[in-house]
Image (cartoon, rainbow, N blue to C red):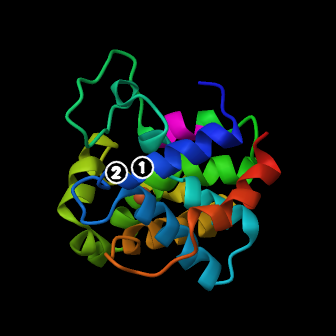
Amino acid sequence: MTLTAGRLLDALARSAATRYGGEIVSELEHALQCAELAREAGADEELQLACLLHDVGRFAVDQSLVSDTTERTAVGTGARGHHEVGADLLAPWVPERVAWCVRMHADAKRYLCATEPAYVERLSSISRHTLRLQGGVMSADDAARFAAHPWLPDALALRRWDDLAKVKGTPTRSLADWAPAIRRYVP
Ligand SMILES: [Fe+2]
């Protein structure tokens, strides 16, 4: 799919009808809550955008192309993680840091599982299920390499907001409020 702002906004709007994995919020509510948490925390616009779009590989992509799908679709050959597929979709348009944060949001979970034992306990059952599909807990060598990356704090912040953005009824800005930010990057 060639990405346009219109298609992206349509896909986000349609994701209001899809539950986020097995969680109680919709995919749209999850995206808006994640972006809102970033905004409230004073994150810059790039990181807010990464939060809004981090699951684009779930809501704007044919799920037969996704290996860690939570939907009951058959996974096709050559399928990859939703974070990889989503980051590739965004990469031509958004700043490199935004695409990197989207690409790394599963690895950030794997990293936190490796470095904060209590983190695993707080994961939802769906998130534990997808952790296995995403490669499981990160090895010590990979965690040390990941820790050296200058954008690691961004990836971890996104991940923590991602984990919190599952509360039914949380007030957020609307999708229309985010449209100008999307249109600033995607044509
Ligand atoms: Fe998410």
> Residue 21 in the image: x percent, y percent?
27, 52
Q: Magenta stretch containing residue 82, yes or no? A: no
- The type of residue carrying mark 1 is Ser
Mark 1 sits on what residue?
15
> Residue 164 in the image: x percent, y percent?
39, 75
- Residue 115 is left or right of residue 19, and the answer is right
Q: Secondary structure at mark 2?
A: helix
Say which quarter of the image contains residue 67: top left
Mark 2 sits on what residue?
17
Ligand 1 sits in quadrant: bottom left
Q: Residues within 10 Å of mark 2 (few under 14, many from 20)?
A: few
Q: Main secondary structure of the magenta part?
A: helix
**For residue 3, above or below residue 149:** above
Which mark is drawn over residue 96?
none
Q: Work out which quarter of the rendered image holds the C terminus and state it.
A: top right
Q: Secondary structure at mark 1?
A: helix
- Label count reads 2
Residue 141 appears in view = no
**For residue 170, above or below residue 34:** below
**For residue 93, above or below residue 1:** below
> Residue 70 in the image: x percent, y percent?
26, 43
**For residue 62, above or below residue 18:** above
CB within 8 Å, label 2 to label 1: yes
Say which quarter of the image contains residue 47: bottom right
- Residue 117 is left or right of residue 159, and the answer is left
Q: Which residues are magenta?
A: 83-87
